[in-house]
Image (spheres, helix red, strand yellow):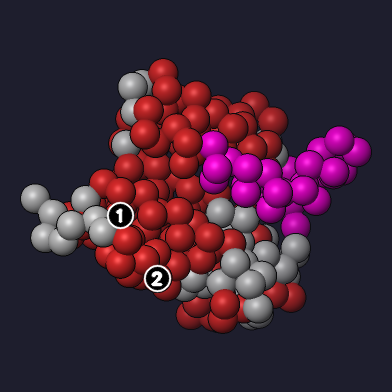
């Protein structure tokens, strides 16, 4: 039972909390803690899991994946418990945007895939599992992380509708649009056939 009613003020509060949680740059924190150098000067310079993997540390990449997904899930679950479903969607959206556009890094953050998957799992776990499996299947078939990300994000709204989670579909579509925008350079490389495969530096 929500402690707070999802009024406009409460939604704004959870927007701020969600953004704050999402904006924690775990990729930078983890690589620094592992002594792997400045992630901004490695590979693509991105703070996400794929670039952490380019440091050569699978453990650091796995931890980044869990933490980036976890912050999205925590934002959703906290908001749902304390303020209801509308607040949980707002917190999830803002956690995602916080990851992609963190104020601490000049609004230059990650591409949002792990956070997208984490908050989908928290919002509607069957949809989240379907998106995760879609990512795994696409990435395994192509050996290209960005392809898995794009196919997974694109499938989110469809999975939500198919599995009966209609309120989640609009949010999933909005998040997918941002994922595609954040992957514009990857899409250009995919079209040119120059996108690196998983494990390449």
Q: What percent of the width, then of the height, locates residue 135? A: 54, 35
Q: What percent of the width, then of the height, locates residue 111? A: 62, 55
Q: Residue shown at 56%/54% (left/top)? A: 112
Q: Residue shown at 62%/78% (left/top)? A: 105
Foreground of the two, 71 or 81: 81
For disc 2, the marked residue is 16
- On whether residue 132 falls in the magenta region, the answer is no
Above or below, comparing residue 67 to residue 16 in the picture: above
Q: How many marks?
A: 2
Above or below, comparing residue 51 to residue 191 in the picture: below
Above or below, comparing residue 180 to residue 62 in the picture: above
Residue 86 relative to residue 72: left or right: left
Q: Secondary structure at mark 1?
A: helix
Q: What percent of the width, then of the height, locates residue 84? A: 21, 51
Residues drawn in magenta: 173-201
Q: Quadrant of residue 101?
A: bottom right
For disc 1, the marked residue is 87
């Amino acid at each position: 039972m929500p402690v707070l009613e999802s009024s406009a003020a409460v939604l704004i509060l959870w927007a701020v909390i969600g953004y704050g949680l999402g904006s924690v740059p775990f990729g930078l924190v983890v690589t620094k803690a592992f002594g792997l150098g400045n992630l901004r000067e490695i590979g693509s310079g991105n703070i996400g899991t794929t670039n952490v993997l380019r440091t050569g540390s699978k453990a650091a990449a796995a931890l980044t994946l869990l933490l980036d997904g976890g912050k999205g899930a925590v934002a959703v679950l906290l908001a749902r418990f304390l303020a209801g479903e509308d607040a949980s969607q707002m917190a999830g959206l803002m956690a995602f945007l916080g990851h992609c556009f963190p104020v601490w890094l000049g609004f230059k953050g990650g591409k949002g895939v792990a956070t997208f998957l984490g908050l989908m799992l928290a919002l509607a776990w069957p949809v989240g599992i379907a998106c995760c499996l879609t990512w795994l299947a696409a990435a395994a078939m192509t050996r290209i992380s960005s392809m898995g990300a794009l196919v997974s994000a694109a499938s989110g709204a469809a999975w939500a509708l198919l599995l009966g989670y209609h309120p989640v579909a609009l949010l999933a579509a909005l998040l997918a649009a941002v994922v595609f925008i954040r992957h514009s350079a990857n899409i250009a490389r995919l079209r040119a056939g120059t996108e690196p495969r998983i494990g390449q530096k």
